[in-house]
Image: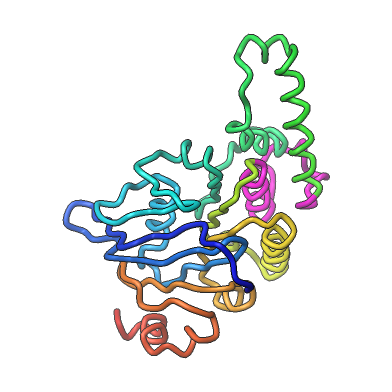
Amino acid sequence: MSEANTILRLENISLAFGGVKALTNISFDVKEHEIRSIIGPNGAGKSSMLNVINGVYHPQEGTIYFQDKVRHKMDPTQAARQGIARTFQNIALFKGMTVLDNIMTGRNTHMTSNFLMNALWWGPARNEEMKNRKKIEEVIDFLEIQHIRKTPVGKLSYGLQKRVELARALAAEPSLLLLDEPMAGMNVEEKQDMCRFILEVNQQYGVTIILIEHDMGVVMDISDRVVVLDYGKKIGDGLPADLMKNPDVISAYLGTNH
């Protein structure tokens, strides 16, 4: 990975729910245009960290810097407006809606026309709609899902639903994309396709990616850098190959710390 500016920096982040500590004094940064993976055993705090980054949770301690500015408390909608998009560990799509309509919801932060203009499809609303449709069609072509564009999402295979969720996130034109186990439950062929799309999103679109993934083969293949969590604490941070030699990381994954 070439030298790049830091797009996200987390300093001394701590998060607790009542007396239960989910994250303890965690610091790491994310460079522009890199794929930064977060790994660790179940319950390590990985999804909690993503929830902190996109505003679902607000840490009790620590500071978040996004694009060189201190980011104060915000909700996920505000985070989306700043350029942070997300997919979820459990698919969060509208199952009765078509693929096209689901992806269209990813454009909400780019819509400015009022209700009356939209109802009449007049003036700026018409231009805005055409612009949004064009962007959506680009994403559909990019992810090779033209053949299912009018299919209700609930009728699709699990792997295709995951791809539609990625398409909805890309429709928002994010600068930072958070992927929470995008390959969970997929077969080998589906994983290969998703890996290819993630790499192309990163390389062709220039989108910075934070990835949570349990498949260590995937992590080793596509990550620029990796941060390792265990019991809500950071136990490793660096290049994938170096971390696989780290005794603390090996111990956590073999279960000797549990």
In front of the other: 19 or 184: 19
- Specify whether 71 is left or right of 167: left
Q: Up-down: is 112 above or below 60? A: above
Q: Quadrant of the N terminus?
A: bottom right
- Residue at x 35% of width, y 47% of height: 57
- Residue at x 41% of width, y 51% of height: 51
Colouring: rainbow
Q: Up-down: is 21 above or below 229? A: above
Residue 191 appears at what percent x and percent y?
67, 66
Q: Which span of residues is magenta-colored?
A: 142-171
- Specify whether 135 is left or right of 23: right
Q: Looking at the image, which residue sits at the far left?
A: 19
Residue 212 appears at what percent x and percent y?
50, 64
- Residue at x 54% of width, y 67% of height: 36
- Specify whether 12 is left or right of 152: left
Residue 159 appears at what percent x and percent y?
66, 56
Whether the magenta-drawn stretch holds residue 170 is answered as: yes
